[in-house]
Image (spheres, rainbow, N blue to C red):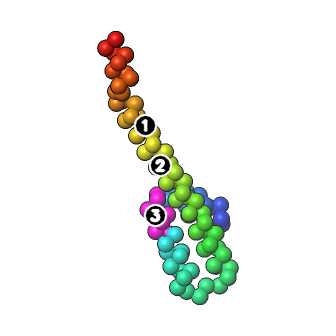
Amino acid sequence: MPAKKQSQKNESLNFEEAIERLENIIEKMEGERIPLEELLKDYEEGTRLLNVCKEKINTAKEKVEKINNSLNEDKPSLHQLDEITD
């Protein structure tokens, strides 16, 4: 499969699918004697999958931070309570 099509396919994977595919590539590379050309192809796909996973983790992290920030905004602080009672 051409690199561009493979890259688009990898980006459409969810995190768990990408991790599973990455694990399969690692097992294959560790366990089999692979021709150099195929090894390089798998290595390239693995690096793309790793980037997909990193992006998905960063997106999830940003969402968690937004949720936490919104929760903190809803909590009244002592400063806000002092303003209400004045």
Give the extent of the magenta segment. Answer: 14-21
- Mark 2 or 1: in front is 1
Residue at left 54%, top 57%? Answer: 54
Which image quadrant is residue 67 in? Answer: top left
Q: Judge left or right: residue 41 versus residue 84.
A: right
Amino acid type, mark 1: Asn
User: For mark 2, does the 10 Å Cα neighbourhood hold few (<14), some (14 to 19), or many (20 or more) residues?
Assistant: few
- Asked if the residue at tag 1 contacts the one at tag 2, i.e. Cβ–Cβ closer than 8 Å, the answer is no
- Mark 3 or 2: in front is 2
Residue projecting furthest to the left: 85
Query: For numbered disc 2, what is the local secondary structure?
Result: helix
Q: Judge left or right: residue 20 versus residue 44.
A: left
Query: For numbered disc 1, what is the local secondary structure?
Result: helix
Question: Which of marks 2 and 3 precedes in the sequence?
Answer: 3
Q: Is residue 46 visible?
A: yes
Q: Position of residue 57 (x, y in %)?
A: 49, 54
Q: Judge left or right: residue 84 versus residue 59.
A: left
Reading the image, the residue beneath label 2 is 61
Reading the image, the residue beneath label 3 is 17
Disc 3 versus disc 2: distance between alpha carbons?
A: 19 Å
Q: Quarter of the image for the C terminus: give it.
A: top left
Residue at left 53%, top 76%? Answer: 26
* Main SS of residues in magenta: helix
**Residue 34 vertical position relative to residue 6 in the rendered view, above or below:** below
**Residue 68 vertical position relative to residue 76 in the rendered view, above or below:** below
User: For mark 3, does the 10 Å Cα neighbourhood hold few (<14), some (14 to 19), or many (20 or more) residues?
Assistant: some
Question: Which of marks 3 and 1 precedes in the sequence?
Answer: 3
Q: Residue 69, which numbered label?
A: 1
User: For mark 1, does the 10 Å Cα neighbourhood hold few (<14), some (14 to 19), or many (20 or more) residues?
Assistant: few
> Is 58 covered by the magenta stretch?
no
Amino acid type, mark 2: Lys
